[in-house]
Image: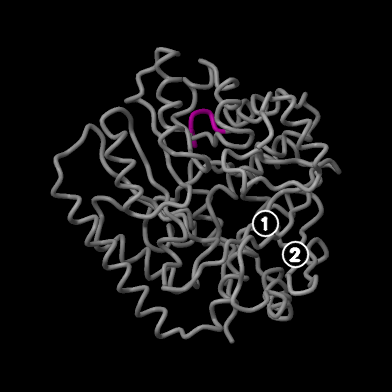
């Protein structure tokens, strides 16, 4: 059986951008990431234990090739000393444990954050592909291609609508929950070929390189969460994280994630200074229309022309949802739509809802107080209560 992961480039771009920032700003940070499956599965994930072990052993044998390093160095926001670090980098097997608790799979990566933060996307891609290998591959791919052609037809039909102030742009965000690596490549290549007017990039750095697409991504929740335990006052952790990002990238990668402690608490910290320096905001939980209206109202309050900013939507989207949001907002601001599972794993099978989230940082709990309560992930109820108190967020 072939291995799932063949290249350390096959991860989300934001893993590299957060990695570089943490290496430069907080290289001593210790972290723990924990795997969780949030939905029912056809068979117990614990059955995959030995296969997951084998794949992680293989992952830890990989290193970056000279060609991969050259590609990363060619991205203007990647610094040469980070590339030098990656030249020496290998995942350390001792920093990740795989086991079973009853029928559940337990995977924990724990150690220096700059050595364990990269495990997340690879682990999720591994578990997904191993799980879906047990289903009828031919039937799944036939249905997947049928559904992909339906999406393409939907977007071509949309092209007959009157133009809006800003164009429709969609990106692939599907690495972590994909059906398989080769299927993911087929989907992205098909979209590039069939819909070049709308399909503008992928978060998968390897596919971006191989298919000559723009790699897409800035930051994820773990970046802002880390600052809850890096020594700054908890109330100031978002501002500290955003300031370090500004200093690291000096105008590049300017889309900020808003839902680590909820949109209202984020906007309270996103003052005129940050609103001018960042190009836009990314939505990943809560009602997207409410979120978008709050963002536009915030820019209006700060007397910033929203046409110069971008709202990126990335929470469980499919093509109809993205088009509906586009029609609602496209005459008022620039937009982008990151579609994940619905592009890379829409096969007529129930996708896994798996995550591998940062749960401890420097020995302290960290948390996301999502605008979608089911996305909150923290075992320490005392810390959650304290976080809510600090940011004046009522319990759900």
Q: Residue 158 location in percent, x, y?
A: 20, 50
**Which residue is painted at 42% across and 51% down in the image?**
317
* Residue wearing tag 1: 356
Q: Which of the two residues, 7 or 267, is positioned nearer the viewer here?
A: 267
| Vertical position of residue 192 compared to residue 279: above or below | below
- The reply to whether callout 2 and callout 1 are in contact (CB within 8 Å) is yes
Q: CA distance from mark 2 to mark 1?
A: 8 Å
User: Where does residue 63 sit, x and y in percent of width and height?
Assistant: 65, 65
Q: Secondary structure at mark 2?
A: strand
User: Which residue is located at x 27 percent, y 65 percent?
Assistant: 150
Which quadrant would residue 330 be assigned to in this image?
Answer: top left
- SS for callout 1: strand
Q: Name which quarter of the figure residue 370 lies in.
A: top right
Q: Locate residue 395: give its quadrant.
A: top right
Query: From which residue to which does the magenta span run?
Result: 249-254
Q: Residues within 10 Å of mark 1 (few under 14, many from 20)?
A: many
| In magenta stretch: residue 124 | no
Residue, x 41% and y 85% (percent of image)? 138
Where's the N terminus, which quadrant?
Answer: bottom right
- On the image, the x and y values in percent for residue 194 come to 24, 62
Q: Quadrant of the C terminus?
A: top right
In this rendering, the answer to whether 157 lies above or below 327 is: below
Residue 253 magenta-drawn? yes
- Depth order, front residue of 274/260: 260
According to the picture, the residue beneath numbered tag 2 turns out to be 107
The relative height of residue 309 versus residue 337 in the rendered view (above or below) is above
């Amino acid at each position: 059986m072939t291995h799932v992961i063949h290249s350390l480039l096959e991860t989300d771009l934001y893993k590299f951008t957060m990695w570089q920032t943490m290496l430069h700003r907080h290289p001593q940070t210790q972290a723990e990431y924990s795997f969780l499956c949030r939905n029912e599965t056809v068979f117990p994930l614990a059955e995959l234990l030995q296969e997951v072990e084998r794949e992680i052993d293989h992952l830890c044998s990989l290193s970056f090739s000279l060609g991969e390093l050259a590609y990363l160095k060619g991205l203007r926001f990647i610094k040469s000393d980070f590339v030098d670090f990656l030249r020496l980098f290998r995942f350390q097997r001792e920093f990740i444990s795989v086991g079973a608790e009853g029928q559940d799979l337990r995977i924990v990566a724990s150690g220096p954050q700059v050595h364990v933060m990269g495990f997340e996307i690879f682990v999720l891609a591994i578990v997904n592909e191993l799980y879906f290998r047990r289903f009828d591959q031919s039937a799944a791919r036939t249905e997947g291609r049928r559904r992909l052609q339906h999406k393409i037809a939907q977007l071509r039909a949309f092209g007959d609508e009157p133009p809006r102030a800003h164009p429709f742009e969609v990106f692939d965000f599907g690495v972590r929950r994909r059906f398989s690596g080769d299927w993911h490549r087929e989907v992205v290549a098909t979209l590039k070929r069939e819909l070049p007017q709308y399909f503008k990039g992928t978060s998968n750095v390897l596919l971006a390189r191989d298919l000559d697409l723009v790699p897409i991504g800035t930051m994820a929740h773990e970046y802002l969460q880390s600052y809850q335990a890096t020594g700054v006052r908890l109330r100031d952790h978002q501002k500290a994280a955003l300031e370090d990002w500004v200093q690291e990238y000096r105008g590049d990668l300017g889309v900020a994630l808003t839902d680590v402690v909820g949109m209202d608490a984020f906007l309270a910290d996103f003052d005129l200074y940050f609103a001018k320096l960042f190009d836009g905001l990314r939505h990943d939980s809560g009602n997207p229309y409410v979120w978008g209206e709050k963002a536009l109202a915030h820019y209006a309050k700060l007397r910033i022309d929203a046409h110069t900013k971008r709202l990126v939507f990335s929470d469980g989207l499919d093509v109809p949802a993205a088009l509906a949001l586009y029609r609602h907002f496209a005459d008022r601001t620039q937009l982008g739509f990151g579609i994940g599972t619905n592009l890379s794993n829409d096969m007529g099978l129930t996708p896994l809802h798996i995550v591998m989230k940062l749960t401890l940082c420097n020995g302290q709990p960290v948390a996301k107080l999502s605008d979608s309560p089911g996305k909150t992930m923290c075992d320490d109820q005392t810390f959650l209560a304290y976080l809510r108190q600090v940011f004046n967020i009522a319990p759900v």
